[in-house]
Image (cartoon, coloured by chain):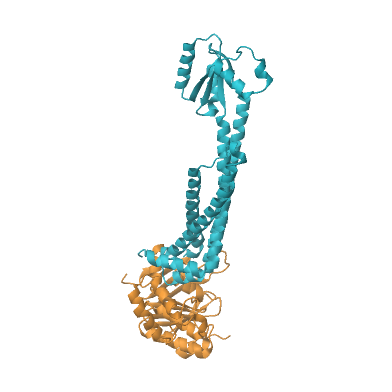
Chain colours: A orange, B cyan
Amino acid sequence: MGVINAMIKVKNVTMNYKGAHRSALKDISVDIDRGEFVFLVGPSGCGKSTFIRLLLRELIPTKGDIFIAGHDLINMRRWRVPQLRRNIGCVFQDFKLLPNKTVYENVAFALEVIGSPTKAIRAQVPEVLKLVGLEDKLQDYPDELSGGEQQRVSIARAFANRPSIILADEPTGNLDPTTSSGIMALLNKINRTGTTVLVATHDREMVDSMRKRVIALEEGTLIRDQQRGVYGYEE
Amino acid sequence: MSFRPFYFLKESLVSFKKNWVISMAGVTTVALSLLLVGSFMLFAFAMNSLIKSTEQKVEVVLFLDQGVPGESVEALQAELMSWEEIKNVLYVSKDQALERLKKDFKGSEIVDNITGNPLPASLEITLKDPQKANNVVDRLKDRPEIDDIMHDREIVEKLFAVTRVARWFIAIFVGLLAFASLLLIANAIRLAIYARRKEVTIMRLVGASSWFIRWPFLLEGILQGFIGALIAITLLYIAKVTLIDKIKNSILMFLPIGLSQQEFYQLVFGLIVAGVVIGAAGSVVALRRFLRV
């Protein structure tokens, strides 16, 4: 295992969906180190979501290898998958909050279902909600919150059990620019705690202003991997 | 992942209450399906006891030769009793036969016109398995003590052909009904789970184990099946008390449409087990789609 130092290691991965004419991803190789902040950019349909779903082992690639923190995803037993996912926090464009649970309950739920002890939940939930700046809204329901606040709840949920990786799929896709930069700042803050963060986005301004590593996909092919990069597409 | 019964129980009760409209839809489906199966089972039990008692009427009567001495008759009776197909052998003497005739045709001129006793003595055989009647007749027909055997082979065969078909028909129909209700119930549960697919998705994404996700749904399905079965049983019980028992105690008393207490308890037990099993199986089947990794 000593060879694999990267947090996320993707090696010659090709993904063909059943019945599709072309590959969703073609021979992609990427290494992301512990503690990195990476943007995954490209137009809709370029394979960003497929890439994220592969890392969550929702999909298994047609060809190639994927390692997360040294664990081989291709040969991973099914019953191991939940263990993997506990180490990866997910944030989505549509927040995926439970409407009939309060902010507190939404975050606590994520800890309950992985079997955290009640005592730990009572301590961790307020703490992580304070981190995202929602310590005053514990008892609110999602529909009483703004879009930005809802995304903060979902980030709190993803980060509640301190995973080593946060994957965010278009986290600002539904938000206005001001709110978006707040969310990005939050992800940046989480990144500074040592968490590896991967953000799939087509938010040009955000990418250009943050100057982080940029991995660009086009039609399933990796066309650019650049430190302190920019969005770099003409649209 | 440890199994945490109280957490699961709490979760399933809470969700049963929160989604009570959908839960009630499931319960109602179970109740109606089991009611349908149950009432048909009641009918089947009644038919079965009717068939059985009809079959039991099949008996073989041996008319004895006039000159046969008493000890030969006793010997024959003892021998027949030892045959394994035969349940009982009743000796009816000439005098008893005449008595019976007089009783059956009381007040009619037939009785008045009888002089002396023209009736033979007989042995009336009841069989353990009425279907074996023909074998018994075949084995007895050449015995010198016997003058004549009363047994209508053709009627017996026809009767059994009919009862066999009736039994098959009942079995197939109950089977189909049970299958149809299984589908209905699985569908109702699928709806309930579909309504909560978001929760399931989140559970999977944050890394809940498959069984952790399954247990509350499983318990909820069992709860729905159990409550549905109880409702069906209550309705069936009311039907039994107000309809079947009344009929039994009145006009149709002579018809052997019996439903013993024991049979009813069997039915109750069967329906509860069916409700619980179907509820559990339905949730597992319905969840499979949502748990696919």
Look at the picture and state if B218 lies above or below A108: above
Residue B12 placed where, x, y %? Answer: 45, 66
Look at the picture and state if A208 lies above or below B18: below
State the residue lying farthest toward the right.
Answer: B109
State which quarter of the image contains the N terminus of chain B. Answer: bottom left
Residue B98 placed where, x, y %? Answer: 59, 18
> Front-most of B162 and B291?
B162
> Front-most of B25 and B179?
B25
Residue A170 placed where, x, y %? Answer: 50, 80
Q: Is residue B231 left or right of residue A163?
A: right
> Front-most of B220 and A169?
B220
Residue B193 placed where, x, y %? Answer: 51, 65
Rendered residue at 56%/10% (across/down)? B66
Count how many numbered circles sit on residues in the image.
0
Quadrant position of residue B172:
top right
Residue A14 shows up from this direction: no
> Front-most of B132 and A205?
B132
Rendered residue at 49%/12% (across/down)? B70
Rendered residue at 47%/52% (across/down)? B273
Residue A69 shows up from this direction: yes
